[in-house]
Structures are given as structure tokens and as C-alpha cells.
Image (cartoon, helix red, strand yellow):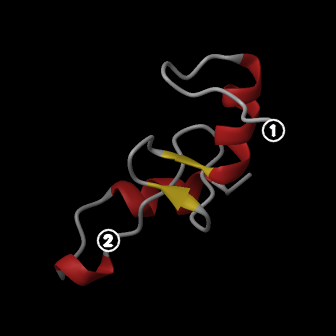
Amino acid sequence: MAKDSVIARSQKKPKFSSRIVRRCFRCGRKRGFMRVFGICRICFRELAGRGEIPGVKKSSW
């Protein structure tokens, strides 16, 4: 989990548009972020496994 100060800093408008840091809204992680869902891969897997993300289901073959 990211520190509160790091999360607050990432929510401020950056001086340059290339400095935007997208973070997971649940845990604050910046790496492994999925833009479509707005969460990181770890949170995505947890929520998808529980069926809390509409239209996503675990594949098996």
C-alpha cells in the first residue's frame, strides 16, 4: 500500500502532462495499472475472482 502523501501528490495536477501518474484507487499501486478498470492487476484479480467486476469472468479450458 502506498503512503498517503504519495497518493495525495499523484492526485495533484502536474506541471507537465507527461508527468501524470495513474494509481489504483484501492491500494495506490502505480505499476501494473489497468486504465480500463482504474485498478492494478492485483486488485483486478481479487475483484474478478469474486465476480465483482461486471462482464469479467475467470477463464478455464
Q: Is residue 9 above or below residue 53?
A: below
The answer to whether residue 15 shows anywhere in this view is no
Up/down of 12 relative to 52, above or below: below
**How packed is label 2: few (under 14 Cα within 10 Å), some, or many (20 or more)?**
few
When the figure is inspected, residue 33 is found, relative to residue 25, above or below; the finding is: below
- The percent coordinates of residue 25 (x first, y second) are 52, 41
Image coords of residue 20 (percent x, y): 32, 71
- Tell us which disc is closer to us: 1 or 2: 1
The quarter of the rendered structure image containing the C terminus is top right
Horizontal and vertical percent position of residue 41: 66, 52
The single residue placed furthest to the front in the displayed view is 61
Q: Quadrant of residue 5?
A: bottom right
N-term mark: 1 or 2: 2
Which secondary structure lies at badge 1? loop
> Left or right: 61 with respect to 7?
right
- Residue farthest along the right direction in this orientation: 61
Q: Is residue 21 left or right of residue 31?
A: left
* Dot 1 amino acid type: Trp
Residue at 61 percent of width and 64 percent of height: 32
The residue that label 2 is drawn on is 20
Q: At label 2, which amino acid type do we have? A: Ile
Residue at far left of view: 16
**29 vs 45, nearest the viewer:** 45
Please give the residue where the numbered disc 1 appears in the rendered image.
61
Q: Could you tell me residue 59's position as x and y percent? A: 72, 35
Q: Give how far apart the Cα atoms at labels 1 and 2 are.
A: 39 Å
The residue that appears at 67% across and 56% down in the rendered structure is 3
